[in-house]
Image (cartoon, grey):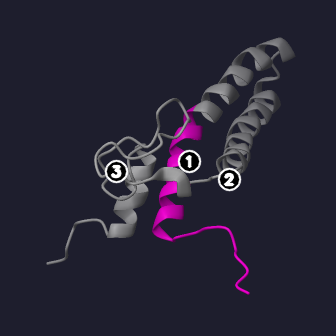
Amino acid sequence: MTDQRPSQHTAGLVAGLRGRCPRCGEGHLFSGFIALAPRCDVCDLDYSFADSGDGPAIFIMLIAGFVVVGSALLVDAYYEPPMLILGAIFLPLMLIVSLGLLRPFKGILIASQFRNKAEQGKLEL
Ligand SMILES: [Zn+2]
């Protein structure tokens, strides 16, 4: 019989996806929509190591751009609706998809940064 529990690495990524602490999986990672909390409210992990930078935005631009713009092009090719209708449907959809993915992607990248101990390069002299 195989062990069905997720590995520690996978559990950390799932916790990040849920906006939870990458170490304990319980505390809140965010204090606002995408603002990081200063530390975990359960295990007291200091989140000062976390800097996802532009990582989430790049992934979201690629994914949302592919899905939403691709869908808009298909709808335009098959149904040829007026541009106003296309804009009325797909511009809000782009906003919803982008904002909906922002927090989970930021959580995953911070959890991955924590698990892989990623940090700025340092010169040792
Ligand atoms: Zn924690």
Say if disc 3 is inside 8 Å of ligand 1: yes
Tell me if label 2 and label 1 are in contact, CB under 8 Å. Answer: yes
Q: Which residue is mark 2?
A: 55
Nearer the N terminus, badge 2 or badge 1?
2
The image quadrant that residue 34 belongs to is top right
Q: Main secondary structure of the magenta part?
A: helix
The residue at the far bottom in this view is 125
SS of the residue under disc 3: loop
Residue 75 in the image: x percent, y percent?
A: 74, 29
Q: Quadrant of residue 122?
A: bottom right
Examine the rendered structure and indicate whether residue 118 appears above or below residue 68.
below
Residue bearing the label numbered 1:
105
Which amino acid is tagged 3?
A: Asp
| Magenta part of the chain | 100-125
Q: Which residue is mark 3?
A: 44
**Among all residues in the image, which is located at the extreme left?**
1
- Pick the residue in front: 25 or 96: 25
Q: Nearer the viewer, residue 123 or 81?
A: 123
Circle 2 sits in a helix, a strand or a loop, which is it?
A: helix
